[in-house]
Every structure is written in structure tokens, then in C-alpha cells.
Image (cartoon, grey):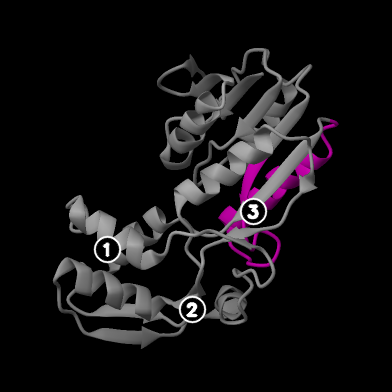
Amino acid sequence: MKILVTGGTGTLGRHVVGLLRARGAEVVVLSRHSGLVCDLLAGDVPAIDADVVVHLAGGQKGDDVATRNLLAACTGVRHLVYISVIGADTVPLAWLRTKLACEQAVAVSGIPFTILRAAQFHDLTLTMVRAMAKLPVVPVPGLRLQPVDAADVAARIAELALGAPAGRVADLAGPAEYELKQLVRDYLTSAGKRRPIVPVRLPGKVGKAYRDGHNLTLDGDRGTRTWAQFLAAAQAGDVLAR
């Protein structure tokens, strides 16, 4: 089986590529810097010669355009797997609305597809709380998260890519739900830092969506690696303070 992976050099993509190759798949990585070099947003996408496309590439802007450009080049592709985000249709953030537009483009493309929505990765959660903790006083909105490990998501993506198209499958979140203030406290403890934490209120529709838990899944699948396990590994690797 020949599988093309977009974003194969990223946090999630590296895991997915390794898992697929370990299962005997012929994997081609499409990225802007290595493998099949291509800028999806620019639209210079060559004809895709693959049985399966795993679309993991993404950015803060233009994902919908990039996805449509990719889909137009997928002549003959038998299965497209797309990674999206929990809350794409319920949290009114521009980035999430773009992810929803990508889902809709995939669904009407005529290509058999599988869509997996995942929660925020541990890596991104660490980046967020680390940036917040650089302030002398840490303002923390009252919201809840279900961070999931990238390796857990990769295992599910690889499984889906090697299987039959399944439409939108069950969401995937981490094994536990946390208040953001707890995630910040856990990071501060692991990093050996002391900071006062001040609760703040997210305004508007976005704040209400987060307070109502629209970024969470109650009945989806769950990963196995916990936030505490991730922090311990990050501490051992000396990456907490970067």
C-alpha cells in the first residue's frame, strides 16, 4: 500500500510515518521542506500517486484553501484520512471554523474518507502553559481541556489509514479532563517555578463555548498517556523551560 502523508515532518506526522512504515506501507512525505516538496497553500500540487492520503498538514491560516488544493490533486486516491479538532463545529474561533470547512470539503470531494477529531495535544498544551508562566502573574481563564498525547493520536490515525474509509469516527481525547489552572500548576511544579495565578473570564461567545465544554468530548475514545506522564518525560528531557 502506498500512502502519502502531508505534514509528515510535524509533531503528529513523524509518529504516523514511523508507524505506517513499521506496518510495511510505502510512505511518501509531502512537506514544504523535504520528501515530496510542495506548498499546498500555494496550489502547486502535483498529481497524487498514492492509494491513501493522510492529511495532517495545517497552520493558523489557509487550511481550507490548502485542503481544497490537495483534494483537486487526489485523482485515483481510494481513501483520504483527515485530522480535525474537537469543537470544530461548536467553538466560534476562526481557526476552528477553518477546520470545519476542511471537513466539509473532504466530505463532498467524492473521495472515500475518514475524519478524526482530536483534542489539544500535550505538546501544544505545554507550549501554551509555558508561555503563560513567563509572566510574573499568570492570568488563567476558567476553561477545561482534555489534552491527548500525539503518539496516541498517531496510533489511531495509522489504524484508520490502513483500514477502510469510515466517515467521521469517534473523537479522540486524553484520559482525563483538567481545569486549565490545574495544568498550569502542574507545569509550574514540574519546572520548579513559583507564580501567583489569577483567574480571568473569557468574554463573548468563545468564552461561553469553552465554559459550556463545547471543546470537550463526553463519549469519544480516550488515549492512554496522561498529562503527568507527559510532563515527567518532558522534565527528564529538559524541555520544560524552553
Give the class, few, some or many, for how many residues have Cα within 10 Å of label 1's Cα (few <14, many ≥20).
some
Magenta extent = 82-110
Element type where label 1 sits in the image: helix
Reply above or below: 200 against 124. Answer: below
User: Judging from the image, what secondary structure is the residue with disc 2 in?
Assistant: loop
Q: Nearer the viewer, mark 3 or mark 2?
A: 3
* 144 vs 51, nearest the viewer: 51
Residue 5 covered by magenta stretch: no
Q: Which residue is mark 1?
A: 130
How many discs mark residues in the rendered view? 3
**Label 1 – label 3 distance at C-alpha:** 25 Å
Q: Nearer the viewer, residue 53 or 156?
A: 156
Q: Which residue is mark 2?
A: 143
Task: Tell me which residue sits at (45%, 37%) in the image.
Answer: 15
Q: Amino acid at mark 3?
A: Arg
* Residue under the image location 81 percent in, 41 percent down: 107
Q: Left or right: 224 with respect to 139?
A: right
Report the quarter where the N terminus lies. top right
- Amino acid type at image mark 1: Arg
The residue that mark 3 highlights is: 117
Q: Are marks 1 and 3 in contact (CB under 8 Å)?
A: no
- Are dots 3 and 2 in contact, CB under 8 Å? no
Q: Residue at x 77, y 17 (%)?
A: 75
Categorize mark 2 by other alpha carbons within 10 Å: few (<14), some (14-19), many (20+). many
Q: Position of residue 97 (x, y in %)?
A: 65, 55
Drawn side of residue 51 relative to residue 226, left or right:
right
